[in-house]
Image (cartoon, rainbow, N blue to C red):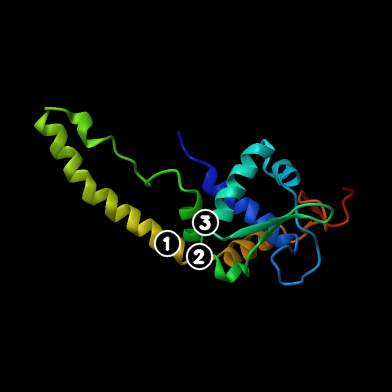
């Protein structure tokens, strides 16, 4: 089963940044976890758990009460996809079964040993790729793909400019 936490975390960070909630003083307001859950199409509890992981990694902060919500802790240029991946990762890019699962089978042990190096190399290559892309790069792609999209000052759901909320 594929882990969607990484993609959802990028979605949440994108919403917070597009709402102007990145601490730079741009217009907009910090989206709540309930509003973010609407946009992602999932339960607010799932969103809050992910936001908790992002907070532990120092990528977001929250404020309670009126006008409260979730904010990124810095500019999008300073957050790489690797930062997000490490904050919410499910497992290695290619998780292997426990080496002990091979039991007494020498072939199983050797297959596992042979795959260790391959998986480590694949993981390192993926992490290099993620480190080369910032949240700002993702925002640029999102804006290019949806030039009429905006995030309202309080709502975090995306809508076309001029479209009724």
Label 2: how many residues lie within 10 Å, few (<14), some (14-19) or many (20+)? some
Residue drawn at (76%, 71%) of the image: 25
* Most foreground residue, 54 or 164: 54
Q: Earlier in the sequence, mark 3 or mark 2?
A: 3
Position of residue 67 in the picture relative to residue 88 (left or right)? right
Q: Name the residue rendered at 17%, 38% in the picture.
A: 111
Task: Point out residue 151 in the picture as x, y percentages from the top left corner.
Answer: 78, 56
Tell me the CA gap for discs 3 and 2: 11 Å
Q: Position of residue 141 (x, y in %)?
A: 62, 62
x 58%, y 71%: residue: 77
Of label 1 and label 3, which has the lower sequence position? 3
Using the rendered view, name the quadrant where residue 154 is placed. Answer: bottom right
Q: CA distance from mark 1 to mark 3?
A: 13 Å
Looking at the image, residue 165 sits to the left or right of residue 85; the answer is right
How far apart in space, not on screen, are marks 2 and 1 (Cα)?
A: 7 Å
The residue labelled by disc 2 is: 133
- Left or right position of 24 against 67: left
Q: Identify the element where label 2 is drawn.
A: loop
**Helix or strand or loop: what does disc 1 sit on?**
helix
Q: Residue furthest top?
A: 104
Residue 51 x %, y %: 61, 49
* Mark 2–mark 1 CB contact (< 8 Å): yes
Foreground: disc 1 or disc 3: 3
Circle on res. 84: 3
* Residue 131 x %, y %: 45, 64
Local packing at callout 3 (Cα closer than 10 Å; few below 14, some 14-19, many 20+) is many
Tell me the tag on residue 129.
1
């Amino acid at each position: 089963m594929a882990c969607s936490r990484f993609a959802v975390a990028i979605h949440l960070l994108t919403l917070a940044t597009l709402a102007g909630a990145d601490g730079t003083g741009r217009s907009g307001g910090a989206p709540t976890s309930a509003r973010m859950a609407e946009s992602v199409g999932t339960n607010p509890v799932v969103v809050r758990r992910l936001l908790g992981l992002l907070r532990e990694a120092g990528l977001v902060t929250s404020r309670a009460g009126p006008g409260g919500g979730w904010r990124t802790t810095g500019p999008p240029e300073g957050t790489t996809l690797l930062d997000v991946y490490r904050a919410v990762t499910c497992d290695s890019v290619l998780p292997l079964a426990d080496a002990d699962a091979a039991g007494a089978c020498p072939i199983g042990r050797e297959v596992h040993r042979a795959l260790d190096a391959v998986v480590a190399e694949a993981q390192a290559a993926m992490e290099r790729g993620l480190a080369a892309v910032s949240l700002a790069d993702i925002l640029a792609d999102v804006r290019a793909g949806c030039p009429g999209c905006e995030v309202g000052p309080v709502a975090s759901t995306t809508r076309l400019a001029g479209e009724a909320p």
